[in-house]
Amino acid sequence: MEAIKILIADDHPVVREGLFAMLSREADFEVVGEAVDGVDAVNKAKELNPDVVLMDLRMPELDGVEAMRQIKAAKPDVKFIILTTFSDDEYIFSGIEAGARAYLLKDTPREELFKAIRAVYRGESLIQPVVASKLLDRFTELSRRAPSGEELSERELEILRLMAKGAANKEIGAQLSIAQSTVKTHISSIFQKLGVNDRTEAVTEALKRGIIHL
């Protein structure tokens, strides 16, 4: 059976050495290289063609998320496992969005790490329960928001477009021939439907979802 080629990307020498020693004992694993930072990870991935990259998130020169994006663009078949000390929500979502098929914390038992490498190599995904619960929380939060602005009325969309151009409530009222109090009511409704707290967030969210365009 052909060995799974693994690249270790971590800026801590002790971590790299420990992983190398541990993985090298498995007959179906071959550690083809080690990267000391994000830039090094991108270069080594291009050069060594690993099957799986064990990627730390916080590294000098280039963080793990951006390194994954660059590797994915150059080598679409490479699979990623995030191995990190961070279980913060934003790290999880950014990492998975960048293409990680598994997200493991560094205190993961070795057998679970081995299992993850083999699963990801086969095209499967593996996410620890602590990470999965945070993902579910985020999906629940997103599901409460209005889907792609469909619930915004035509008048709210008009106001949102004017807000994006920097118009104040008085200007919006004058352009649409409605009272400022009515403008405020519509804006409050827009905030609620988009799940935001101010005008800047509303415009940013609407642009991100493609509800309006500059």
Image: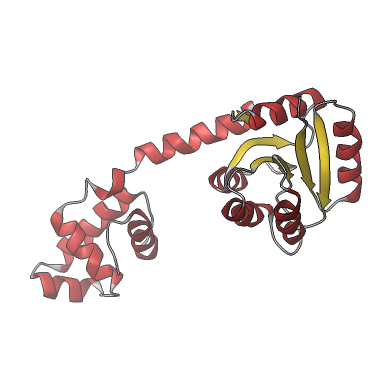
Where's the N terminus, which quadrant? top right
Q: Identify the residue at horizontal 66%, vertical 41% (top origin).
A: 80
Q: Which of 177 and 203 is in front in this view?
A: 203
Quick check: 63 above or below 123?
A: below
Q: Nearer the viewer, residue 122 or 54?
A: 122
Which picture quadrant has residue 167? bottom left
Quick check: 190 above or below 111?
A: below
Tell me: 4 left or right of 161. Answer: right
Q: Identify the residue at horizontal 31%, vertical 54% (top origin).
A: 191
Q: Identify the residue at horizontal 85%, vertical 33% (top origin).
A: 23
Where is residue 104 drawn, in percent x and y?
70, 35
Where is residue 92 drawn, in percent x and y?
60, 43
Tell me: 138 left or right of 209. Answer: right
Residue 180 visible? The answer is yes
Where is residue 144 drawn, in percent x and y?
35, 38
Q: Identify the residue at horizontal 19%, vertical 76% (top origin).
A: 171
